Amino acid sequence: MTDTIVPQTTRKDWTSDQEVRWCPGCGDYSILAAVQMLLPELGVRRESTVFVSGIGCAARFPYYMNTYGMHSIHGRAPAIATGLAVSRPDLDVWVVSGDGDALSIGGNHLIHALRRNVNLTILLFNNQIYGLTKGQYSPTSEQGKVTKSTPFGSLETPFNPVSLALGAEATFVARTHDMDRKHMMETFRRAHFHRGAALVEIYQNCNVFNDGAFEAITGKDARAEKLIPLVDGEPIRFGAEGEHGVMLDADGRLRLVEVSDVGVESLLVHDEAREDPGLAFQLSRLARGPFEPTPIGVFRAVERPEYGDAMTAQMARAEEAKGVGDLGALLRSGGTWTVEA
């Protein structure tokens, strides 16, 4: 009986003895604090929790957690975490990655982990810049961004991480920001308890190489007018008095409206469990960038068979149908063999 009881912990129990070495004022500090404060509330064990990261400023995260962890290969954290989650379904596996790590060299690994619906909680720190390598543009940098690697301005259309995840058929997709600990903790909680691949984009400030990238919407005085909270089952509205809203036009397009002009009954009611991701995708495209009213919260949360569960069931069916195979005999056999249908 005692083996099933999870000991009570505090933030201190989840904090490692390593000195946190991010730039003073970096948004990573607040994300780290939110995770360390949340984990004692989740009823999980440190020895059953794993953080896997890639390369970049965000990738130092496992060092600061008193859990198992791995600072892995650039962009390959989702692939490595997939192997761990599938082989050890008893573990809580978190992936920590930045916009460069996850969406540049790691883009292929990310989208396949999402489409397969591997049981991972993926935290994507988005500061729209390469911070560790001192300020080059990233896959989420806006067009025209002047950096050390784009001295005349970036020519590329940036990725929208939420849109990308929805396009990959991720079963849980959300967005939060580093200036609101309560919102971060609740969003991470939802992602953790989701069975399958959960991606949370976090708007995170890099105060050295891209300071104030999200200030126009996450600043204390701007949030009411610029952040659009997505609450399942409720009309989508925002503003200090809820005076603005989102409406679905007859032509199927979303637009921002004044509630006094159209009435609350005309507003779009958010449905995060909607099977078709099309409407969630439209919400993710509502803002052209972090300078216009921007949806925040859970865009999609649907159920679909988890990859590890499906693989285990498939192996069980194969063993039942053909009996347990002899790996030794296979290795000692000839150079070719026949697989019967």
Image (spheres, rainbow, N blue to C red):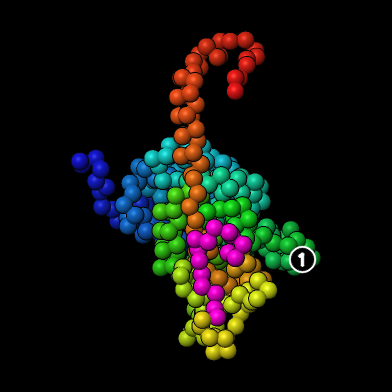
Asked where in the image residue 32 lies, by quadrant, the reply is bottom left
The x and y percentages for residue 152 are 79, 65
Q: Is residue 74 magenta?
A: no
Q: Is residue 73 left or right of residue 93?
A: right
Residue under the image location 49 percent in, 76 percent down: 235
Q: What stretch is highlighted in magenta?
A: 266-280
Residue under the image location 48 percent in, 44 percent down: 306
- Please name whichever residue, 86 or 132, is drawn nearer the observer in this view of the structure: 86
Q: Is residue 101 left or right of residue 326?
A: right
Residue 114 visible, this orientation: yes
Residue 61 visible, this orientation: no
- Please name whichever residue, 64 or 225, is drawn nearer the observer in this view of the structure: 225
Residue under the image location 73 percent in, 62 percent down: 157
Relative height, residue 248 to residue 134 (above, below): below
Q: Does the magenta stretch include residue 277?
A: yes
Given the image, on which type of amino acid does mark 1 rest? Gly
Relative height, residue 6 to residue 162 (above, below): above
In which quadrant is the N terminus drawn? top left
In which quadrant is the C terminus drawn? top right
Kind of element beneath mark 1: loop
Relative height, residue 167 to residue 93 (above, below): below
- Please name whichever residue, 109 or 17, is drawn nearer the observer in this view of the structure: 109
The x and y percentages for residue 241 are 47, 86
Relative height, residue 252 to residue 138 (above, below): below
| Residue, far bottom | 260
Mark 1 crowdedness (10 Å alpha carbons): few <14, some 14-19, many ≥20 = some
Question: Mark 1 — residue?
Answer: 153
The x and y percentages for residue 43 are 31, 52
Q: Main secondary structure of the magenta part?
A: loop
Residue under the image location 49 percent in, 58 percent down: 301
